[in-house]
Amino acid sequence: MRRLVIVTFLLLALAMGGAAWLLRQVDVTGPLASPVEMTIPAGTGSRAMAKQLAAAGVIAYPWLFEGYVRVRGVAGRLKAGEYRFNKGVSLRHVVEKLAEGAVVQRSLTIPEGYTVKQVLALLAAREDLKGEALPIPAEGDVFPDTYNFSAGTSRPTLLATMTARMETEVAAAWKSRASDTPLETAEELLILASIVQKEAANEAEMPQIAGVFTNRLRKGMKLQADPTVIYGADLKDNDLKSKDMKEDHPFNTYVHAGLPPTPIANPGRAALRAAANPARTDALFFMALPDRSGHVFSRDYATHQKAVKAYWAAYNQRKKEGQ
């Protein structure tokens, strides 16, 4: 049957002007009037593919498509998947796209500072992914970024890409770490980076935030980082109360000195680099600016308390004015 198709194709080509006609037909503007996206199911042969493309208006002649892919030797290499074809796409470009498997690329963005629980929720919400996101990664093992994938990609495959990226980024940050860092392992760097990620208002101040925490680690001071308490007690940011800072759990850095037992989120590259190379500073405290655009850094407690009072005065004023 395959030989018959090829012979028929060649005879038709010769009858209608030979090779020159054939070349013109594969390169001329196709019949597609407007861009279209379509899915070629797995297991679709070249003949069924030709019929589907013709029905969608992508190509004019199914027999020409089938004959061309066989003469080109790519009939068995045409790939299933989701494709986008532009208006007037030529037969040659249609075949090249199918042979290359140039499927439509979807994307998923993992924001910096998301927890593994939030990442899994994003993956679960995507109907263009398949399978269960297993194994569940440890906190801090997913690198925040935008990931491209084709429809039908498995969640485990995409998740494996994300965790591999974090391994690479942590290794690079650890390799470039400051020689006098008090951190003893790459895991400790990841933990500190996750705290920096949650505390910083912007990337520019991350090295300074990391510098404060590094100074506290060197001095044996408690980190007193609100995000660790929030994570350990599974609270929302606005739900943190003074009583929560007294609760005795492993993530409460108001109660326990040193780093918490695990990361509290998935940090981005800037936070990892800040943790590896913190700013050289004598600051031991920081407090949010009234507009929360950044922080005020202080070297002593008395100066820090002034910043705290300034913040709460502005907060109460805004509340009074109904803002």
Image (tube, rainbow, N blue to C red):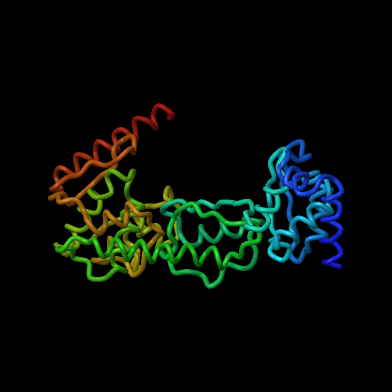
Q: Nearer the viewer, residue 14 or 47?
A: 14
Where is residue 120 shown, x and y percent of the image?
Answer: 54, 61
- Name the residue at the top extreme: 321
Q: Nearer the viewer, residue 256 or 76?
A: 76
Where is residue 241 shown, x and y percent of the image?
Answer: 37, 52
Q: Residue at x 14, y 49 (%)?
A: 281
Q: Is residue 281 above or below residue 187?
A: above
Quarter of the figure that contains the C terminus: top left
Where is residue 289 shown, x and y percent of the image?
Answer: 28, 38
Q: Is residue 113 above or below residue 32?
A: below
Q: Residue at x 47, y 69 (%)?
A: 137
* Left or right: where 30 falls relative to 305: right
Quarter of the figure that contains the N terminus: bottom right
Q: Residue at x 40, y 59 (%)?
A: 265
How many discs appear? 0
Q: Residue at x 66, y 58 (%)?
A: 99
Q: Nearer the viewer, residue 29 or 277?
A: 29
